[in-house]
Image (tube, grey):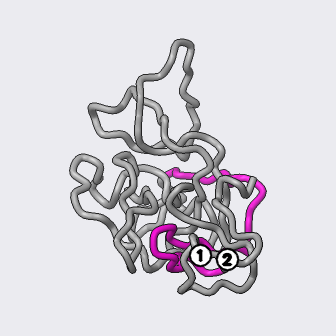
Amino acid sequence: MTVFSCAKCGTALTPDLRALDAVPGVSTRQEDRDRKTGLAPSTVPPGHYAIDPEPWGAPFVAPGPGYRRAEDDDRALLMPPDMTDMVSAGPRDTVIVHPDDAPDLRLADGLGMHHGCCGPLGTGGRNMACGACGALVATLAADCMGPHELHLDPVRVWADLSSRHPSSRHPSSRHLPSGHLAPTRLT
């Protein structure tokens, strides 16, 4: 079991979560979406997390020669009009959690073109702040036209691999429990 905490203030951002072996496949087809909200099913089920080894989110760059976009990529982000031909050069090893497993995160202001009709696109970089200190620690993609997933930034969160998590303890403390690692070291 793992608890993810804000690297700036040490506040627990999630409850104990169980690791998945890989990022699960998920459908974003219209018939699989929530009828009320239009959201796709969350990529990761409640109570779990997965490490995404691929680049995800901002920044975005022009693809290199020979790049071919996957046709059936249900996790592809809906891109703003001036970014449709770009690909992610964002961080690898982001931690995907169910959005409801991080209830104290708050949506940041100023999403601008990175906000769709129903929610954030996830294309503008970190858009979720720690409820305790305000540090931007995650990116939520939750528009009705793309995936529904929350990516914790591997540099801005810490993973406590022990089953007991003192949420008031800061990650830089000398008294960290054994197994307290950055998420990029989980794989």
Tell me which corner region of the image, top left, top right, bottom left or bottom right, holds residue 19. Answer: bottom right
- Residue at left offset 29%, top offset 53%: 116
Q: Is residue 106 above or below residue 121?
A: below
Q: Main secondary structure of the magenta part?
A: loop
Residue 149 visible to the viewer: no
| Frontmost residue, 40 versus 136 | 136
Which residue ends up furthest to the top in the rendered image?
Answer: 65
Amino acid type at image mark 1 = Ser
- Residue at left offset 56%, top offset 13%: 66
Q: Position of residue 104 (x, y in %)?
A: 43, 79
Q: Which residue is mark 1?
A: 173
Q: Is residue 59 magenta?
A: no
Secondary element at tag 2: loop
Q: Position of residue 148 (x, y in %)?
A: 49, 59
Question: Which quadrant would the N terminus be assigned to in this image?
Answer: bottom right
Secondary element at tag 1: loop
| Frontmost residue, 3 versus 168 | 168
Q: Position of residue 111 (x, y in %)?
A: 26, 55
Q: Mark 2: few, some, or many residues within 10 Å (few <14, many ≥20)? A: some
- Residue at left offset 38%, top offset 66%: 135
Please indicate whether residue 20 sits to the left or right of residue 70 in the image.
Answer: right
Q: Are marks 1 and 2 in contact (CB under 8 Å)?
A: yes
Q: Is residue 37 above or below residue 111?
A: below
Numbered range of the magenta stretch: 1-29
Amino acid type at image mark 2 = Leu
Q: Which residue is mark 2?
A: 176
